[in-house]
Image (cartoon, coloured by chain):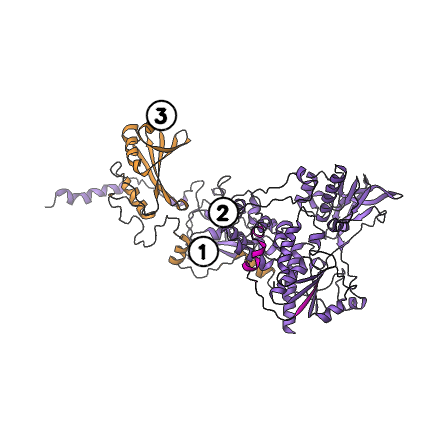
Chain colours: A purple, B orange
Amino acid sequence: MTKLNDILSPFTAWKHVVREPVTIKDPLNREAADRYRGFHKNDISECIGCGTCESICQNAAIDLVPVDGVETKDGDSGLRPRVDYGRCCWCGLCVDVCTTNSLSLSNEYTWVDEDPDNFRFVPGAENKSWDNREKGYKKPGNGYELYSPVRESMEELEPEQRDQSFIEIVQGYSKEQAEKEADRCVECGICVATCPAHMGIPEYIKAIRNDDLNEGLRVLYDTNPLPEICGRICTHKCETVCSVGHHGDPLSIRWLKRYIADQNPAEEYKKILNTETLQPTGKKVAIIGSGPSGLSAAHYLALMGYQCTIYEKLPAAGGMMRFGIPEYRLPYDQLDKDINYILSLGVEIKYNMTIGKDITLEELNKQYDAVFSGTGLHMGRSTRVPGTDHPEVYQAVDLLRDIVLGNEVPVKEKIVVIGGGNVAMDITRSLARLQKQKFGKVDMLTTSLESEDIMPADREEVIEAREENAVIDPGWGPVEIETEGDKVKGLHVVKCLSVFDENRRFAPKFDEEQKKFFPADMVVESIGQGMDLSYLSEEFKEQLKMDPRGRILVNDDFQTSVDWLFAGGDMIQGPDVIHGIANGHKAAMGIDKYLSDK
Amino acid sequence: MQTIIENLQKHFQVVSYHQQRENLGFLIASKEVAVGLITHLRDYEGFAHLVLLTAVDWIEDEHFQLTYLLHHPEKKVDLGVRVMISRENAEMYSIHHLWEQARTYQRELREMFGINFPGSPDVDKPFILEGWEEIPPYRRDFDTKEYSEKTYFPRPGRETHDPAEYMKKKLYPNE
């Protein structure tokens, strides 16, 4: 039965019509909370387009797209994130993981537009009303990082443990350390373009994370057949652009590479790398010089089935890696591990063979289908200031070579080195060890034209040299080496104000008023090396095209103007090991192309 | 707080206790004693209010962590009771008889983590995911990205670029 109330109650509800509403009249004008997560903001001058925001987005709401006015260059992909608000769930993970801290969320959450496509835009590149809003969600500070900004520290010998011997200083990562370090990688791949060999860096770091070191080794050998060596002494340009390095320490890419190579036993390389049997082509290639470029070319040519013979002037292989880099940075057994594997692929080395003396280039051309030359830069350059022709003035590369060959090396109590590059640090630290052994103390002074901030040597080399009690006093230009009869008295220098002009050309400026005298009874010059092309006959040199600076001209395949001769290594690019490896690889592919077309 | 814990330890096995701040602490109890312990906290210690019941998937350790957060209105302190239960056939005793609202939490955990609470009213009814056929979405082995790619088709006009590939194309295309 219907109750009276059931009939009346709809009418009593009408009384609410005249009541003050409890809701807010116009919510569209209400500002959100200070840390509300609204539309994105991106400082596109800080952003490097690493794409980590895209990778972490669980809704696939972010695309990386080219943006007008943003250039692709070392350390910056030139891409910027575009957000699709049809998918964004405003979780803020993209902000939390952003490596450059450029991405944030404003607290603006209302925006009315009739065209749905407008809700897909590149924050920072397309102006929005909330771009300058301070309020919103930013990456939380310390303790909330999604990856550690701090590098796993590396065990090294203490200065007093190492300053008398040539034992390797850097101890290498343990499994636990390597995996922890690898865990910091965001896999963006920004580093790949900067590496001269374009190594698959994110892939091999991933292999460490997955504890699949065989796979790691395969990734390394795709582009670099000298991983033990590069894992120790590479100039690691990759680390200078690492996205994680923008707010924290960059990944320790070089030590991770070393970890993979160290952990794989030499006797299993052929099995892991699937090189137990190679298909021979029947063609032969001669290689001059067993430095990084020659070994790299030999390795990749051998994989393609070419019979390679390396002609080496010295009694051991490795070039500058053996005769330039001291043992405390690169122990010989590790160098030999890489070289012996390449030899195991059927590459032969003829030692103590000087081209032009023991065999001529023309003879090589007759005996082989192609020739690769990577003879490097082994002739020390002189400052040519008065006194440099004195017998107690030496070239760093000559001394470094003599140390390795076991020849007697002159060591005086007070030595001055001129030069600010890695070779200068190598000779400084080597002589410091020999001084310590001979005299029980170190008295080394190294000076360079470049001031401390622009010294070309790796930073850690300078730091470690000082730890070993060498004095580094940069920013001085040599004027004269004072001599007296058969003795050297020291080096006169003046203050160097700048090294390069505005066009980045070498044009040092000095303040002649600011003078200094470094007393010494031995001076070593280490200001750079030149190439020695005396193995080429005069007739041959005339056929070979050179660039205006006297370098051999090569095409993209590292082929010279004489079609059967290819050239690489420090003569052409660098100078450093990784450029040599890269151009030796390219030359190997160039030779293959040349011989396949022939 | 310390006296409450000491008192509690006389009656129950408490695996560990951690004082996060003055008015907040967490203890770990075994699955078997947890409901008795929570009942004791409510009826004898004065933790009258269930603030929340939630879970964490510790997939590497193969268990779920349940957290019952209890509030003491007079002392103004909170105590979290953590219980580790196996991920496989995940099941926990219901506490809906202690607090009526626990049934809602348990229904949510059933849906989002796949943890069963036998006897809890309506525990098998869909909570917010109607017609869900995947593994429970808060389980860490649920691939959110794969699901969203499969479920929500991309809008036309979308394209993306891999930074490393793009840089190769721009900076060294012939190498």
Task: Give the alpha-carbon distance from disc 2 to disc 3, as whole Å.
Answer: 43 Å
> Depth-wise, is mark 1 or mark 2 nearer the camera?
2
Asked if disc 1 and disc 2 are in contact, CB closer than 8 Å, the reply is no
Q: Residue at x 67, y 51 (%)?
A: A332
Q: Earlier in the sequence, mark 1 or mark 2?
A: 2
Question: Judging from the image, what secondary structure is the residue with disc 3 in?
Answer: helix
**Magenta span has A270?**
yes
Q: Amino acid at mark 1?
A: Asn
Q: Chain of mark 1?
A: A
Along the viewing direction, whichever of B43 and B92 lies nearer the viewer: B92
Task: Give the alpha-carbon distance from disc 1 to disc 2, as whole Å.
Answer: 26 Å
Q: Amino acid at mark 3?
A: Thr
Q: Residue at x 26, y 49 (%)?
A: B125
Asked if disc 2 and disc 3 are in contact, CB closer than 8 Å, the reply is no
Question: Judging from the image, what secondary structure is the residue with disc 2 in?
Answer: helix
Residue corresponding to mark 2: A97
Judged left or right of residue A159, residue B59 is: left
Task: Give the alpha-carbon distance from disc 1 to disc 3, as whole Å.
Answer: 60 Å
Within 10 Å of disc 2 (Cα), the crowding (few <14, some 14-19, many 20+) is many
Along the viewing direction, whichever of B97 and A106 lies nearer the viewer: B97
Q: Which residues are magenta?
A: A260-287
Judged left or right of residue B123, residue B166 is: right
Within 10 Å of disc 3 (Cα), the crowding (few <14, some 14-19, many 20+) is few
Q: Quadrant of residue A517?
A: top right
Relative to B17, residue A207 above or below: below
Q: Which mark is residue A118?
A: 1
